[in-house]
Image (spheres, rainbow, N blue to C red):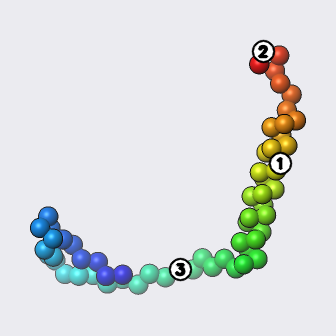
Amino acid sequence: AHITLLDHNGDTFGSAQNTDITSVLRISDMTGFIIIGFSLLLGLVGLWRQFHRKKDPDE
C-alpha cells in the first residue's frame, strides 16, 4: 500500500510511506462449507426452539 497525506487543497505534504499488506488467514473450500453448514444448523435449531417453546401464562 502506498500512503500519502493530503491537505485540504489536495496537495501532498510529508514523505510517502509504503507498507506491505500480508494475510495469514486462509480459508479452504471445505472450511467455508463447514462454516456455512454450522450456521444453517444453528438457524434450524433456532427455528425449532421458536416454534416449540412453552409460552408464559401472561403472554
Circle 3: is it few (<14), some (14-19), or many (20+) Cα within 10 Å?
Answer: few
Secondary structure under the numbered disc 2 in the rendered image: loop
1 and 3 marks in contact (CB < 8 Å): no
**Residue corresponding to mark 1:** 45
Q: Locate residue 38, reporting x and y percent.
A: 78, 61
When asked about the image quadrant of residue 56, the answer is: top right
Q: Secondary structure at mark 3?
A: loop
Rendered location of residue 20, percent (x, y): 41, 84
Distance from disc 1 to disc 2, alpha carbons, whole Å, reads: 25 Å
- Which residue is identified by label 3? 23
Q: CA distance from mark 3 to mark 2?
A: 53 Å
Left/right of residue 36 with respect to residue 49 in the rendered view:
left
Judged left or right of residue 28, residue 24 is left
Q: Residue at x 21, y 72 (%)?
A: 5
Q: Quadrant of the C terminus?
A: top right
Label whose residue precedes the other's in the sequence (1 or 2):
1
Query: Which amino acid type is marked by label 2?
Result: Asp
Mark 1 secondary-structure assignment: helix
Precedes in sequence: disc 1 or disc 3 = 3
Q: Farthest residue in the top direction?
A: 58
Residue 49 appears in which quarter of the rendering? top right
- Closer to the observer: label 3 or label 2? 2
- In this orientation, which residue lies closer to the viewer: 24 or 38? 38
Identity, as a three-letter code, of the amino acid under mark 1: Val
Contact, CB < 8 Å: mark 1 with mark 2? no
Residue 55 image position (x, y, % from top left):
83, 24
Residue wearing tag 2: 58
* Residue located at (15% from left, 71% from top): 10
Tell me: 2 left or right of 8: right
Position of 26 with respect to 41 (left or right) is left
C-alpha separation, residue under disc 1 versus residue under disc 3: 34 Å
Counting every numbered tag in the picture gives 3
